[in-house]
Image (tube, coloured by chain):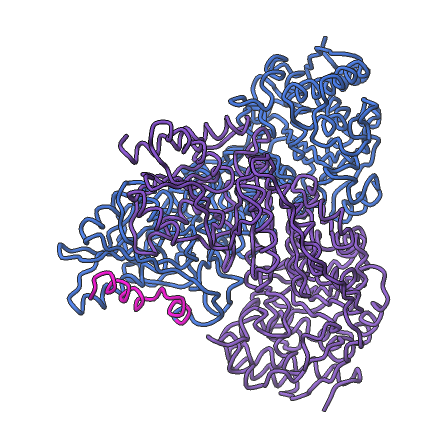
Chain colours: A purple, B blue
Amino acid sequence: MTVQTLENVGELAQQLRVDSIRCSTAAGSGHPTSSMSAADVMAALLARHLRYDWQQPDNPANDHLIFSKGHASPLLYSMFKAAGVISDDELMTGYRRFGSRLEGHPTPVLPWVDVATGSLGQGLPDGVGVALAGRYLDELPYRVWVLCGDSEMAEGSMWEALDKAAYYRLGNLIAIVDVNRLGQRGPTELGWDLDAYTKRIEGFGCRPIAIDGHDLDEIDRALTSVAGAGQPTVILARTRKGRGFSEVEDREDWHGKPLPPEMAERAIVELGGERQLTVTGLPPEAASPRTRPSGEVRLPRYELGAKVATRLAFGQALAAVGALAEVVALDGEVGNSTHAEEFAKAYPERYFEMFIAEQQLVAAATGMSVRGYVPFAATFAAFFTRAYDFIRMAAISDANIRLCGSHAGVEIGADGPSQMALEDLAMMRAVRGSTVLYPSDAASAAQLVQEMADLAGVVYLRTTRGAYPVLYGRDEAFPVGGAKVVRSSPDDRVTLAGAGVTLHNCLAAADLLGRDGIHARVLDLYSVKPIDTETLLEAAAATGDRIVVVEDHYPQGGIGEAVLEALNDAGRSVRVAHLAVRGLPGSGTPAELMEAAGISGGHIVQAARDLLGA
Amino acid sequence: MTVQTLENVGELAQQLRVDSIRCSTAAGSGHPTSSMSAADVMAALLARHLRYDWQQPDNPANDHLIFSKGHASPLLYSMFKAAGVISDDELMTGYRRFGSRLEGHPTPVLPWVDVATGSLGQGLPDGVGVALAGRYLDELPYRVWVLCGDSEMAEGSMWEALDKAAYYRLGNLIAIVDVNRLGQRGPTELGWDLDAYTKRIEGFGCRPIAIDGHDLDEIDRALTSVAGAGQPTVILARTRKGRGFSEVEDREDWHGKPLPPEMAERAIVELGGERQLTVTGLPPEAASPRTRPSGEVRLPRYELGAKVATRLAFGQALAAVGALAEVVALDGEVGNSTHAEEFAKAYPERYFEMFIAEQQLVAAATGMSVRGYVPFAATFAAFFTRAYDFIRMAAISDANIRLCGSHAGVEIGADGPSQMALEDLAMMRAVRGSTVLYPSDAASAAQLVQEMADLAGVVYLRTTRGAYPVLYGRDEAFPVGGAKVVRSSPDDRVTLAGAGVTLHNCLAAADLLGRDGIHARVLDLYSVKPIDTETLLEAAAATGDRIVVVEDHYPQGGIGEAVLEALNDAGRSVRVAHLAVRGLPGSGTPAELMEAAGISGGHIVQAARDLLGA
């Protein structure tokens, strides 16, 4: 039987409840009660409003369904069963099991899932990115439906999302808040006060619709009303957690707990037994995404020795890479500092101002990557710490996003420690599958920006505030995972390895050492992750296992530890002199601060001499 | 001349403008225009409303003044000059200079500054913590005044702060938003639309007052009206950036730029010249914080071999440490999982529910530490990534906060990767001055919780979901910076080092190796930072430089790299077999997931055998 009429929707909702109970009881864990509260709304959406070709999840005209409350995965997977794309057997034997694609919280190992959720407050911001792509890039009529929990409305990121959704007039975005009034450990902050939610949502420029989330007529009217909306809709569905099973309905202490088998049996009886309904649903409109022609990328060229900041080269190269039609740029209200604004000048229609909302900045990039765009998001390197949870989750989503953090290290000077990124390399290296790049000159920065467009996963580029000499010629290549031997001779006795600004300090140190007849090899570790183990090993072998590593970053998790890990993994024990920022910097000039931090040319000379016993 | 009348306030405001220009022009950097917009409001506050004993900044009854828009430091420091606590000479020669306490953005190296700001959207959340302490802990009548920028209202954290401020009825908190309509790169999202701000603020349960931020009468009335408020006040001051100097007033492209000297001269003339007014201001009320008697800490005791989760031991020990009257606990709506709720049962009046708002969770702890409390904030380890910018800034603030992250690693099992903290050790190690602890059993967890109460800086405790055997007796001590040799013999040929759950895997591996006659030394690296280099060196020396390090964390920045760094720093090159999580885990049982990640006892055995060539 297929579902279309509203009467059938009620039956479907009961099936979703029963299946949510069955699969979580079978797994011995999961969140059935959080699924049961939203079952009516999701049944109506699935049967009568979602435009989705279940056989072609990559149809660009499909609507999008994101479970921001990812813990309601039993409900989502029960919907997939009702849609006929997973079997009852898979649901019952796969849910939360090792090796199964039906994970505890949804991830895109499933073709019908756009983004990984489970860290609350992220599905809606991600959905904003998908909706931005739909409205401004794809120019497709798809809608983005996001099921949110009421507890997660306490996350500031949800308000960043609604704010941006309203600012960009995302009428194609519909958030459905499952207001079941109970969080994990007790009542939510606002309970069933839909008026309070309504005021907040109106204040943020979105259109609230408060409904009884168990009244199928009200639900259907609300879901119908979103058609042609000029602003985002937020459906506030007043619901009861555990709805439909009297022993748990609207009771505390039932969050995240499967029903024991005997209870599950009673629940299934009360809910009318198992069903095997299948939903046809609505097909997507026949439509194709707007296509734009790509041009040829002509990277900026820099004169050897000219002083150019890598952040400027980033902006100029980004504008050049904009010749590729899928490339998109996002700014955290500092585009004139990161130089992302260079892209805005060339391609204003593919440039998105996210204002000072770094979580939404990254989430929008993640959402755009769902639709195959190539987003570059830029802000100060220090401020990506604000979005670390989003970056971590982007990696779990297998999203392809490119992040550029400018103004890294004590090198920024007078602005002081709040603006210095001294933890960003540690943070970004620890992200699964990430690539971490840190060019020292404009030529390499530009080349790496072009490569970033083709890289998968989370890719991070660290740029420097100040202008330093261009070191490389026009035809030099900078493969990811490589390193450059910037200076070498057969007489090298010590290796000086840096990246970014510290490479220039290494070169200054090599000059000073050279005056005393000490030849030093200089390595540019522009690819921090993956790091070029082979070049490190060669340099170590050529210079008597004497390596100085210098970084404008705290000692933990940065370049020094990356070098130690690489050498160790290669089975080679090399003593490394590790210069890094160890105290709390203040304000000053870049030179003063690098001197005080112990990462200046003079310190490198001393470290090299210590290694040499000279 | 001292300032009291409103006419004089106008003069004072001009002085603040002139001094903001003078100091930033002298420094060659800074944000004079962002200072000039707020000068009228700050002059009125300083002269007629702030209750502050400038000679005794540690007077507990003092009001608090926090510049959430930390880039307006020229204005803040000009206020300090007007208050007579810094000299004109210090302002002119110190601002943004190396070694000076007048840093580019305020930090608590200044005795009148509570918290470091400069990463936008943090001063108000921190202020919520100070106001919580005032109302619920100190029970003092002090007010917390927070100057906010309009751009930073785009940060979700500002709305987390207003939400919690309203929830806790913080009538002692007054946010002043300097609505100068211009951000760094252009107009703000809402411009001068005070109505839009008003609706949002009302929706979030606070009391908005919209005023002309250059009308001294309106300002004075607004500042007066906050007395006795039962809810937080948000003064929306419509202002003009660069107010008072016609060449820059309300113009774009003047953010973060000092006036060139000739322009500064013209500006000072237009503003009526230099002044040297001094403000007396209002004294704080004569009042003392409520004092509570401290009792004796009686830690929970655990039977050797009993299976107890370290997260439970954390909660029980936290409740025990609650005997110390300054100890406070904060929850991110997961207190029944982290077991922070054990504290709530014993000391509900010192337990603060922050709901699912991890940024505010950490900021509240930072704010409470300003008043000398000993806050412990707990959530899932994975979700502290949400607050990394706040943790980083807490370290710059020299705040003393204790964070407990539970459910760390693939060990959590079925919930999947969104809930696994596989980056937290990297993130926390990279924080300046941090302490990172990771106990493997309940006895050590309890001891470490007690030690945390006395530790300065950012202290992080990582706990495990599952229950594992108690390994240590009642009298065992666990000094920070130490490690335990859990198993050793004179015949040890390899060292197995773990922490948390992997220590149990190391013990299982040692058993297996022992069956084949291979003696293994087992180290418990419960103190990840600082790490016990001496014990590592001894173990290396005793076991032929063969060390296996195992961690339930990604390889970057965690325990393995900490060991490599420590050995390298000690001048000892030891080959380490480093077992860590390297792929993207899914759901499963803890055993399945540790096996798949390559960190099980079996993998440790194999790694040890490989090192031994056996």
Q: Is residue A308 left or right of residue B508?
A: right
Picture layout, residue A581 above or below residue B591? above
Q: Is residue B64 left or right of residue A92?
A: right
Identity of the residue drawn at 78% across and 79% down: A48
On screen, A236 above or below B172? below
Asked whether A353 or B68 is in front, the reply is A353
Which sits in the foreground, B165 or B500?
A: B500
Residue B601 inside the magenta-drawn segment: yes
The x, y position of residue A274, in whole percent, is: 62, 87
Q: Is residue B363 visible?
A: no
Picture quadrant of residue A546? top left
Q: In which quadrant is the C terminus of chain B drawn?
A: bottom left
State whether residue B578 is above or below residue B606: above
Question: Where in the figure is residue A303, as x and y percent of width and height?
Answer: 60, 39
Q: Give the image quarter of residue B549.
A: bottom left
Front residue of this view, candidates A600 and B385: A600
Q: Position of residue A3 (x, y in %)?
A: 75, 86
Which image quarter holds the N terminus of chain B? top right
Residue range corresponding to the magenta coloring: B592-614
Where residue A45 sits in the image (x, y, percent)? 75, 75
Instruction: Please indicate whether residue A102 sits to the left or right of residue B425 in the image.
Output: right
